[in-house]
Image: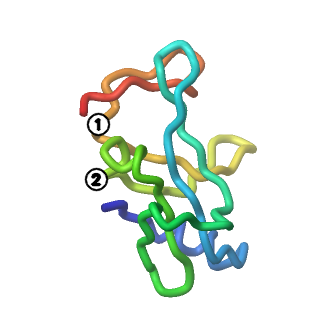
Amino acid sequence: MIEVTDNAIQKLIEKEVQYIRLGVTGGGCAGYEYFIEHAEPISDSDILVDYGKFNVVVDEMSKPYLSGSTLDWVKEGLNEMFRIINPKEESVCGCGISVQFKV
């Protein structure tokens, strides 16, 4: 469902994250925004993907938007962050935060 790069795996293990939640929420000028956060508590309707030393959690509403995506850890200048790379993105607004999907 969601791939995790070696860089992201290393950072999640380094930060001792047990559960990381990936999702989308309505907002921004293009319609949706990604969110990445610690995932506790976990709901019965959440989808849990076990990667051994950590788990990726996705809510049911976000599943069709995130299926086939990759979680990466990137460095851009002085900034370091998790980034979702999603082949279903149709467009990204000028600020780079808000996205539209082709689902």
- 60 in relation to 1, above or below: above
Q: Position of residue 65 (x, y in %)?
A: 35, 41
Q: Position of residue 90 (x, y in %)?
A: 31, 25
Q: Residue at x 60, y 50 (%)?
A: 36
Q: Earlier in the sequence, mark 2 or mark 1?
A: 2
Image disc number at residue 38: none
Q: Residue at x 31, y 52 (%)?
A: 67
CB of mark 2 within 8 Å of CB of mark 1? yes
Q: Identify residue type, mark 1.
A: Lys
Circle 1: is it few (<14), some (14-19), or many (20+) Cα within 10 Å? some
Circle 2: is it few (<14), some (14-19), or many (20+) Cα within 10 Å? some
Q: Quadrant of the C terminus?
A: top left
Element on which disc 1 rests: loop
Element on which disc 2 rests: loop
Image disc number at residue 68: 2
Q: Position of residue 57 (x, y in %)?
A: 50, 64
- 14 in relation to 68, above or below: below
Q: Residue furthest left?
A: 103
- 5 in relation to 90, above or below: below
Q: Is residue 16 left or right of residue 70?
A: right
CA separation, marks 2 and 1? 8 Å
Q: Which residue is mark 1?
A: 88
